[in-house]
Amino acid sequence: MVEFPRVDLLPGPPLFFTDRVEPLAEAVARVDAARAREVPAFVWLTGPQGVGKTALALFLAHNPLGQYGEVRLYDELGGSTPGGRANPSDVLAHFLYQLGRKIEDIPARQEERYALFRSLTAGRRILMFLDDVHDAAQVNDLLPSAPQAVVIVTSRHRHDRLYQLGFDPIELETLTKEHSASLLAELLPAEVVSAEPEALRDLAELCDGLPLALTVAAVRIRRHRQRPVALLVELLRERSPLEVLHLDGDRVISMLLDFCVDDLTPSARRAYRLLGLHPGPDFGAAVVSEVLQAATADDVLDELCAAHLLHETSPNRFRFHHALIARHAHSLAMVEEDESNRLRAVATIVSWYAYRAVALARVVSGRWWVNEAFARIDPAYAGAQAQRQARTELETERPNMHAAVHAAEQAGLDSDCVLLCEALWPWYYDTDREVDLLEAMPLGVAAAERIGDVRQRMRLLHDLGAAAEKAGRHDQALAAFRAVRELAAEVNDIPGEESAVEWQGIVLAQIGRFEEALDLLDEAWQIAQRVPEPQLRERMLHLLRLHIARVRADFGRPEKAYPLLQEADAYFTIRDEPINAARTAQTLGRVLLMLGRPDAGQARAKDAVALFLQHKARAKALRTMQDMASAAAAVGELAQARAWFEQAHVLASELGLLITADEIMNQLDELRP
């Protein structure tokens, strides 16, 4: 065997290192498994630019593998450096020289160099670290022949041919908030960390867990030690980490991302910048296809994911790998796309969400719709699972739908803004999202007013009033419903007038004005009788039965409430309107208790809770538990009352409603024997 000196070309271990427990354990497990099988161990670390691949690789090489390898080779292959991609032949010449070969004895041809390298390393315990690989061809001609070799590779790109060579990627994600703060604490002087802990937490969040950004931010803080960290935080909020964070004048994060994007095909680069205009945090493949005006976006999505610019969070659902990449994509769109292209892309995205929201609304709600688009767009799902599927999709798309409302308002897309608001209201309302409602509905009302659509303005004012009622803003709600009635009269909209009167009654009942409330509900009943469309009239009358019954029960007249509830219960159950069926069952539970039928009341209330929880209306489930507990206590069913309060306390705690949970516990304590 040819003798050569001990070789250790590895750079030193990282000075600062945090988190990475799971990927480190996975890498060690792979090395151990390969050693047991007496085959080479291949460790491939991949992830977006600046995520800490090199640091993890060096930590792995110096710590778990610190005593391994009589030959420890390293080279940086320039995958992220413009014009700096290393030639495997040059790397081999460097390795051969380090292994003791004189320059004049190193073969000229690459294949001869590789043959000599394999011969020299045969039977040796080799640890090789190839950093920042650009493509698999660089790796293919550098692999040692020894079965006990360990090869660590890092790359910012997922290369199919690395899979062919036997590598399987370990993907690194950005750091959690906790570990981001921990890394900053390691990078900064102790007095800075102790002086501004809140500012450092804000800084960690603005850097979105990217180790490179955190490191460069720490350098800036150390360079300007006299300046408060809060000033840097304020600057990052006003501008962007991409602009503010630099080393010796170089905006290193932007530069790395620029190079990564320059490596894309033209179609993927275009998709990247157009997706930078997407208003929400993630998106499905269907939206991307629509923006690109392509039958399928599979190829560009695969390319963007392979480059770690996008991350596939679930099948056919994507997001930018971290917030700084999203900002970079948006900045490219602002520079490389003219205004008309940007507006066209935003309009396409917003319209897609608007029409999808309508298709989903057609499934989840049987309400009457004002916008004519609802008649033209088919329901998104059909069959026994349609409700579940539509509500699941709405839950998934909630941030995007809400962001689309704001994007429509900002871009002057008034028709889409109106359409989105009307479509989202039933689901928002049924799942107790009054905060979203109170934020979105005024935008829809203003958009309807700008386009001069009185009927649509009336509808969205109505929805705003309902949201205000749910949030306990009774004066705002009454004002909205009075305005709705005036607009309904202006356009002779009988259903709109009926609903405005009905809701005024509901609000008055909320503040204990029961007789006035019942008078208004009776007036609404008379108006509903004049609705010409039979199906709409029938649904309105059954909703009125539910609301009148609830007010009668609150007014101490359960015997007059019960027959109305029976009719409403049958109607909403047959119609597959689960939230209204649950509301009816909730009121039935309370009324049956008041009528001296506690077991039957308990059973219906449990039905209501199950339906509310099934359809994500957890606040309504909590309210049902509280109402049943109070009603049971009022009629002397103390065991039932305690059981309902106990369930309510658990749910309130899960929802983070700590004040409510404390109030429930106090009520429960009062009932304990």
Image: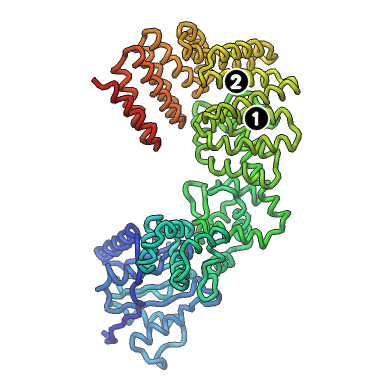
The answer to which of 318 and 176 lies nearer the viewer is: 176
In the picture, the disc for residue 548 is none
| Disc 1 target residue | 461
The residue drawn where x is 39% and y is 23% is 626
The answer to which of 635 and 75 lies nearer the viewer is: 635
Q: Are marks 2 and 1 in contact (CB under 8 Å)?
A: no
x, y percentage for residue 648? 36, 27
| Disc 2 target residue | 504
**Height in image: 102 above or below 214?**
below
The residue drawn where x is 54% and y is 73% is 250
Q: Is residue 602 left or right of residue 338?
A: left
Under tag 1, what secondary structure? helix
Q: Is residue 266 left or right of residue 45?
A: right
Mark found first going from the N terminus, 2 or 1: 1
Q: Is residue 386 visible?
A: no
| Quarter of the C terminus within the rendering | top left
Label 2 Cα neighbours within 10 Å, binned few <14 / some 14-19 / many ≥20:
many
Look at the image and name its color scheme. Answer: rainbow
